[in-house]
Amino acid sequence: MIQLRSILRKYRDILLYLVFGVLTTIVNYLVYFPCCAVGLPAAVSNAIAWVVSVLFAYLTNKPFVFGSMDWSLKTVFPEACKFFGCRVGSGVLETGILFVTVDLLHWSSGLWKIVTSILVVVLNYIGSKLLVFRKKA
């Protein structure tokens, strides 16, 4: 039991990021798939889902994953700009991959959405940890 607590404490950020990453992915899918179902192209559906899920991710990752509790404008504005900036990069990559694989090559939308989601979760954690919510010395 003590070892489990030690492991949980050591990897707290990663474990919480995975939990909220899964929730963010669910939010993304809950927007993406209905948009596709009404006939929007995969790239457009992904862009809409991206906006909603990135907002959700910021509002949950800030306090719960990275422990950033300062909601003052002087903290939130630069933090949110960096957060959304990192997400623009991964969002463009994801949308580009979906455009090529689904819209152009007509491969499975569901499969490629899952593949790109895994890539995006890894890239977003690295960006958040190293650039956005890094601990001040």
Image (cartoon, rainbow, N blue to C red):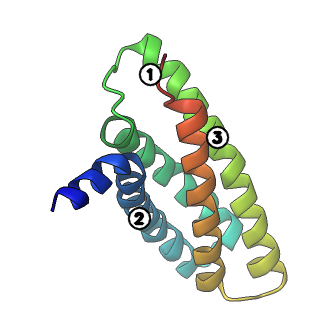
Tell me the residue at 49%/16% (across/down).
Answer: 137
Of the image marks 2 and 3, the number of the one nearer the N terminus: 2
Residue 70: quadrant of the picture:
top left
- Per the image, label 2 sits on a secondary structure element best described as helix
Q: CA distance from mark 2 to mark 1?
A: 24 Å
Give x and y (percent) for residue 10: 35, 47
The amino acid pointed to by label 2 is Val
> Pointer 2: what residue?
22
Of the image marks 3 and 1, the number of the one nearer the N terminus: 1
> Pointer 1: what residue?
76
Q: Residues within 10 Å of mark 3 (few under 14, many from 20)?
A: some
The amino acid pointed to by label 3 is Cys
Q: CA distance from mark 2 to mark 3?
A: 18 Å
> Pointer 3: what residue?
86
Tell me the residue at 41%/67% (across/down).
Answer: 26
- Per the image, label 3 sits on a secondary structure element best described as helix
Which residue occupies the foreground of this view, 21 or 4?
4
Residue pushed farthest top?
Answer: 74
Residue pushed farthest left?
Answer: 1
The amino acid pointed to by label 1 is Val
